[in-house]
Image (cartoon, rainbow, N blue to C red):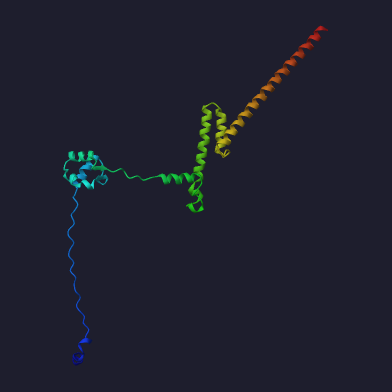
Amino acid sequence: FWLKCASRPPSDRVFRPHRVRRCFRPAPPRPRPMSMKLQKRLAADVKKCGRNRIWLDPNESNEISMANSRFNVRKLIKDGLIIRKAVKMHSRSRVRKNLEAKRKGRHTGIGKRRGTREARMPTKVLWMRRQRVLRRLLRKYRQQKKIDKHLYHFFYVHAKGNAYKNKRVLVEAIHNRKAEKVKAKALQEQMEARKEKAKLLKAKKVAKREEKVEGK
């Protein structure tokens, strides 16, 4: 083996140089920014807010770093080098826009619904709302002397029995009932007037007959 290697011409040998390690020079150290923790803390205390809301002017860092008391910080605040940032807004404009659209009936199709009809709007809640509306109206009418306590009780019981589906129907029913009552009263008065008239006529006839008998 060694003889074979020695007999080879030098051009046949493969030269594999070792990997050369490259030396990198370390970058020069960057100048550290001035620590202004103290100024931020003092400014937050003066402006009565958190440290994150305090803005320090980066162009005037030298002057700001010199301030080591509340008096100096107040002066910088007055000059506008230290500012209290505004509270970040969480806008509800998009929410309001979406709710307005929902009131018109948009975005409420089958694909937007989660839960059964009863879960989304219970029938009990609808019933309670309807009863409260009707009873409120009846109370108001009773206070205003538009209906007496007997009519109030009549309509209260009928409302509980699901006779009126909304306020309009109840108002119509009250007007009709009052009209019927007025009509019945008028008929009763007419009947009594007729009876009185008939009584007077009868009395006249009896008096006439007696006069005739006496004259004979």
- In this view, 60 is above or below 183: below
Q: Which quadrant holds residue 55?
A: top left
Residue 172 spot, x, y in % from top left: 59, 33
Q: Considering the image in quadrants, where does the N terminus appear?
A: bottom left
- In this view, 173 is above or below 35: above
Residue 124 spot, x, y in % from top left: 50, 44
Looking at the image, which residue is at 63% across and 26% down? Answer: 182
Kindly give the residue lying farthest to the top in the view shown: 215
Q: Nearer the viewer, residue 120 or 32?
A: 32
- In this view, 98 is above or below 26: above
Looking at the image, which residue is at 48% across and 48% down? Answer: 120
Q: Nearer the viewer, residue 6 or 143?
A: 6
Looking at the image, which residue is at 18% across and 44% down? Answer: 63
Q: Is residue 123 left or right of residue 173?
A: left
- In this view, 18 is above or below 211: below
Q: Considering the image in quadrants, where does the C terminus appear?
A: top right
Looking at the image, which residue is at 41% across and 44% down? Answer: 93
Q: Is residue 53 left or right of residue 120?
A: left
Residue 16 spot, x, y in % from top left: 21, 80
Q: Is residue 34 left or right of residue 169?
A: left
Residue 150 spot, x, y in % from top left: 57, 29
Tally of numbered tags: 0
Kindly give the residue lying farthest to the front in the view shown: 11
Q: Nearer the viewer, residue 75 or 47?
A: 75
